[in-house]
């Protein structure tokens, strides 16, 4: 049991190590932004004009150097250069240039998210500002709140021109998330990811609130890119969109009405996917195969997967076609296929994404739809998990070992409670990149396969009446030690936790799209699904009581072995979607998610290997039983 837990920890350790590295990189980006913006207040024409500010620049550069010990050598060299420039009191232009270069390298290397998962809600940002920020920064963002007096440094004036047009929502988001050491600006850990972004975007609206501007005054031709709107300041955004300057009306409209403009210009997940696919094609033409693969993978993880549930509701078969088409793009890149073939695949993908957007636009979230979607998620994931739990409870019930029943119930109850906790912490959970979420899901699935195979083999070995009676006698003598039953609790927890984790991901993504008016129906769907699972579970337990014990064990072993094969396919597919192993499409475009069947050689061969292992274990057990019978005869 202890070995099993240790193995799971070791499997997941690289994931959490990567998350820690990303947090360090995020802090480095945060500090680099401060150096790029505030260095001019510390040094002017080679002279220190503010010793406190200059000391802060020195401190920040040393902190960046400490945090960057695991960064690539090229980045570390630039960090050393930045530290030297600051100590030599170099010009603002040089320091800004090097700091910005390091920042971009860090974002690229660690694949840091520089934009929210959904378009920001300015009204929610306004409420959060009033609750958390007004006391220092003031009602109108001028830094003149009731608590501002005596603070050093003084709270930022968000209406001052340099700050208003030189600050991006991404910089504001990092400040909200991480705070500023040795100042009154603390880290607001109590805010989830969406709330932090809403607040960051609201702060950027201050400089434009005095203008009488409407959404219709946005006059740019291209769809607005959320990545640009989040990562660029007003001056950079104006240049990127070909607008006259940071105070132009379209910039004001973008900062005041980002969500409304997104709806007008179709700036959404699927547009993000299209942009990434086009960038992947360009990278592949330049011979940058690794970059092309990353871009194509991100197009699926961050562009298509967040709307997968809604797209399946609109047209399930078409949703599978989209997923398979994007998998074909990745397969061509990984195989080093011809550029012409890749271009055709990308063009077909872009056309399908356009069609997908049309389907989503025609699908409105009525209360019934919100109810059915949330219920279907819980039913799909919950039934798969509780099939194993109910099988275990049936066996325990047949044996009369009441103590074991409590361990099984304790395992799944803990898993459900953990899932509920993850739901309330969904903002922090979504800080994982799409790749990391898929990797965690895949590793948990494969670990569950190992446990299921062991349990299935054990059940098969007890399916003969004589063996079962001998086992019962042995167990009764050992029931004084609870340690022997921890394995049941662990398996119960593991199979339910995997489905709870996946359910939270899907429900969180769906919740972003469901309107306020449908929240009640959304929650009712979840409750309905749990009630249905409970009813089905009771019926299955009642039916299982009628089976003779040997048959119950034999059938249970078969069920668990099949589930192990299904989870193998799902686990390998999830790791493929995380980009950790290759993806090679088969000629047969068959995809049945319910049974873990996917059109890749890696998933099919893995399932075949597990199937052969199951048959081999059962055959071995049969031969062992025959030998023992012969010896007794």
Image (tube, rainbow, N blue to C red):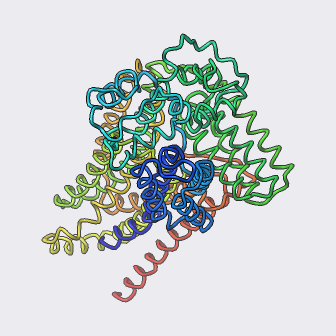
Residue 110 placement (x, y as % from top left): 56, 56
Does the image show residue 597? Answer: no
**For this view, does 198 lie left or right of residue 4?**
right
Residue 86 placement (x, y as % from top left): 53, 58
Give residue 59's quadrant in the image.
bottom left
On the rendered image, what quadrant is the C terminus found in?
bottom left
**For this view, does 482 lie left or right of residue 338?**
left
**In front of the other: 218 or 120:** 218
Residue 19 placement (x, y as % from top left): 45, 57
**In front of the other: 132 or 182:** 182
Q: Residue at x 60, y 51 (%)?
A: 91
Q: Residue at x 24, y 52 (%)?
A: 409
Does the image show residue 330? Answer: yes
Q: Residue at x 69, y 17 (%)?
A: 219
**For this view, does 471 lie left or right of residue 353?**
left
Q: From what the image shows, is residue 621 above or below residue 167? A: below
On the rendered image, what quadrant is the N terminus found in?
bottom left
**In front of the other: 446 or 203:** 203
């Amino acid at each position: 049991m202890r070995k099993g837990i240790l193995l799971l920890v070791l499997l997941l350790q690289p994931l959490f190590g990567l998350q820690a590295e990303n947090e360090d990189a995020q802090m480095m980006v945060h500090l680099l932004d401060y150096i790029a913006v505030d260095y001019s207040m510390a040094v002017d024409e080679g002279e220190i004009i503010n010793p406190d500010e200059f000391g802060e620049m020195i401190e920040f550069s040393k902190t960046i150097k400490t945090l960057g010990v695991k960064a690539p050598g090229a980045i570390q060299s630039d960090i050393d250069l930045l530290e030297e420039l600051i100590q030599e009191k170099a010009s603002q232009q040089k320091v800004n240039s090097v700091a910005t270069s390091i920042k971009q390298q860090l974002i690229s290397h660690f694949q840091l998210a520089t934009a929210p998962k959904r378009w920001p809600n300015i009204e929610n940002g306004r409420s959060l500002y009033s609750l958390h920020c007004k006391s220092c920064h003031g009602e109108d963002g001028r830094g003149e709140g009731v608590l501002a007096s005596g603070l050093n440094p003084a709270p930022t004036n968000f209406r001052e021109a340099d700050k208003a047009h030189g600050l991006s929502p991404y910089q504001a988001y990092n400040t909200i998330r991480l705070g500023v050491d040795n100042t009154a600006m603390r880290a607001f850990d109590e805010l989830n990811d969406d709330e932090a972004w809403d607040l960051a975007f609201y702060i950027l609206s201050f400089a434009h609130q005095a203008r009488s501007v409407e959404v219709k005054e946005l006059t740019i031709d291209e769809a607005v890119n959320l990545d640009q709107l989040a990562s660029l300041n007003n001056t950079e955004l104006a240049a990127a969109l070909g607008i006259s300057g940071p105070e132009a009306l379209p910039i004001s409209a973008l900062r005041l009405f980002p969500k409304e403009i997104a709806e007008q210009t179709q700036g959404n997940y699927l547009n993000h996917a299209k942009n990434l696919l086009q960038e992947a094609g360009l990278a592949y033409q330049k011979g940058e195969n690794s970059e092309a693969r990353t871009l194509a993978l991100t197009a699926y993880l961050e562009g298509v997967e967040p709307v997968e549930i809604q797209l399946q509701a609109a047209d399930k078969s078409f949703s599978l076609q989209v997923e398979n088409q994007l998998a074909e793009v990745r397969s061509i890149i990984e195989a080093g296929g011809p550029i012409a073939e890749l271009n055709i695949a990308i063009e077909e993908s872009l056309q399908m994404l356009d069609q997908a957007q049309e389907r989503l636009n025609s699908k409105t979230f009525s209360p019934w739809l919100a109810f059915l979607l949330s219920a279907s998620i819980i039913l799909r994931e919950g039934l798969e998990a509780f099939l194993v739990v109910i099988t275990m409870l049936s066996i325990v019930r047949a044996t009369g070992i009441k103590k074991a029943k409590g361990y099984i119930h304790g395992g799944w109850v803990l898993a459900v409670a953990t899932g509920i906790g993850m739901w309330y912490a969904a903002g922090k959970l979504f800080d994982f990149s799409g790749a990391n979420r898929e990797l965690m899901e895949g590793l948990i699935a494969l670990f569950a396969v190992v446990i299921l195979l062991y349990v299935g083999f054990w059940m098969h070995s007890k399916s003969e009446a004589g063996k079962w009676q001998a086992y019962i006698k042995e167990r009764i003598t050992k029931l004084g030690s609870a340690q022997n039953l921890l394995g049941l609790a662990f398996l119960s927890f593991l199979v339910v936790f995997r489905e709870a984790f996946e359910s939270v991901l899907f429900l969180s993504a769906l919740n972003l799209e469901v309107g306020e008016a449908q929240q009640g129906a959304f929650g009712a769907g979840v409750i309905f699904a749990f009630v249905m699972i409970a009813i089905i579970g009771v019926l299955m337990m009642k039916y299982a009581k009628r089976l003779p014990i040997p048959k119950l064990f034999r059938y249970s072993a078969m069920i668990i072995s099949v589930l192990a094969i299904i989870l193998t396919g799902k686990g390998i597919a999830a790791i493929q979607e995380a980009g950790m192993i290759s993806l090679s499409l088969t000629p047969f475009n068959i995809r049945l998610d319910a049974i873990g069947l996917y059109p890749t050689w890696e998933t099919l061969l893995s399932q075949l290997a597990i199937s052969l292992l199951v048959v081999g274990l059962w055959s071995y057990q049969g031969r062992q039983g025959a030998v023992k019978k012969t010896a007794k005869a």
